[in-house]
Image (cartoon, helix red, strand yellow):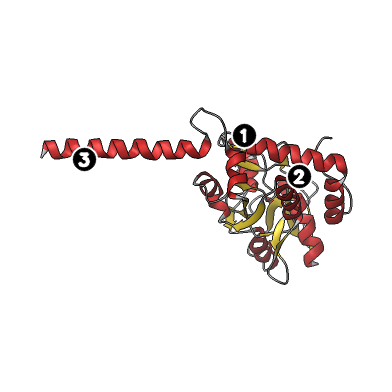
Amino acid sequence: MKRFVTISLAALAILSLGLTSCSKAVKNDGSGKDTSLETIKAKGKLVLGLDDAFPPMGYRNENNEIVGYDIDLAKEVAKRLGVELILQPIDWNAKEQELNTGKIDCIWNGFTITEERAKNMAFTKPYLKNAQVLVVKKSAPYQTLADLKGKAVGLQAGSSAAEALDGAAEFKASLKNVVEFKDNLTALMDLEVGGVDAVIMDLIVANDNIKRAGKDYRILAESLSAEDYGVGLRKNDLALRDAVQSTLEAMAKDGTLADITTRWFGSDISVVSK
């Protein structure tokens, strides 16, 4: 019996070593060289993970097509890299798992750069500035964060809104409860029917939703935190990260980035190379 266990353990060790070698082969060519960009070009596609209900960054239009500001940027980057862009909707709460298991190659969807996320993945430099704000009904009496004491606040699960709220411990402790939703659109629907008193979300997304939906919402002047959007990639995929960054910088230089940004936001609010 002991001999069988020993043999089994040895076999498992060999299998584990083989799997580890295969994993490393994806990352390098055996010399320690980062081949992430070469791998993407060899397979001819870049798989982008996103929440497809996050306008104006990425969402489905009336024809059920995924469109958005980030989509237009990514399409141009993929075109210049000579690969096809594949759009892959994901569970936003499991985004890092989707990335690290290789189901997607990047997260590009109004993705906030945070200290915690930067420990586990590689980010490009910021391309847009943003903030976490609170959306309330126009008729609501709230004007400041303090006014929401004892109230219910909603946010998207796994979002930077949750991290911003955790960073505002005193404000969070003052709330009656925090309700997590699958996406911002569902959270806003709950706000409309009175399920929550406010929703924490991205300023850029909040402005777009208010304008697009035509609902009686407004944004409190006092925000929770300022932040930046970046493209997130696997921790070791630095060659691919640098290629995306240099392509964005080239787009900024030739005016393409400004054209795309103005088309979506009315002016060039991008921060690449600025």
* 205 in relation to 129, above or below: below
Label 3: few (<14), some or many (≥20) within 10 Å?
Answer: few
Residue furthest left in the image: 1
Could you tell me which secondary element the residue under label 3 belongs to? helix
- Mark 3 is on which residue type? Ser
N-terminal label among 3 and 2? 3
- Residue occupying image coordinates x 58% and y 49%: 43
Q: Nearer the viewer, residue 271 or 132?
A: 271
Is residue 143 toward the left or the right of residue 115 in the image?
A: right
Q: Which of 130 and 125 is in front in this view?
A: 125
- Residue occupying image coordinates x 45% and y 39%: 23
x, y (%) of residue 106? 62, 46
- Mark 1 is on which residue type? Leu
What separation in Å lies between label 3 and label 2 (alpha carbons)?
Answer: 54 Å
Could you tell me which secondary element the residue under label 1 belongs to? helix
- Mark 2 is on which residue type? Asn
Q: Quadrant of the N terminus?
A: top left
Q: Can residue 140 be seen in this view?
A: no
- In the picture of the structure, the residue carrying the numbered disc 2 is 130
- Residue occupying image coordinates x 60% and y 57%: 88
Q: In which quarter of the image is the C terminus?
A: top right
- What's the mark number on residue 238? 1
Q: Nearer the viewer, residue 232 or 250?
A: 250
x, y (%) of residue 165? 63, 44
N-terminal label among 1 and 3? 3
Discs 1, 3 touching: Cβ within 8 Å: no
* 266 in relation to 42, above or below: below
What separation in Å lies between label 1 and label 2 (alpha carbons)?
Answer: 25 Å
- What's the mark number on residue 8? 3
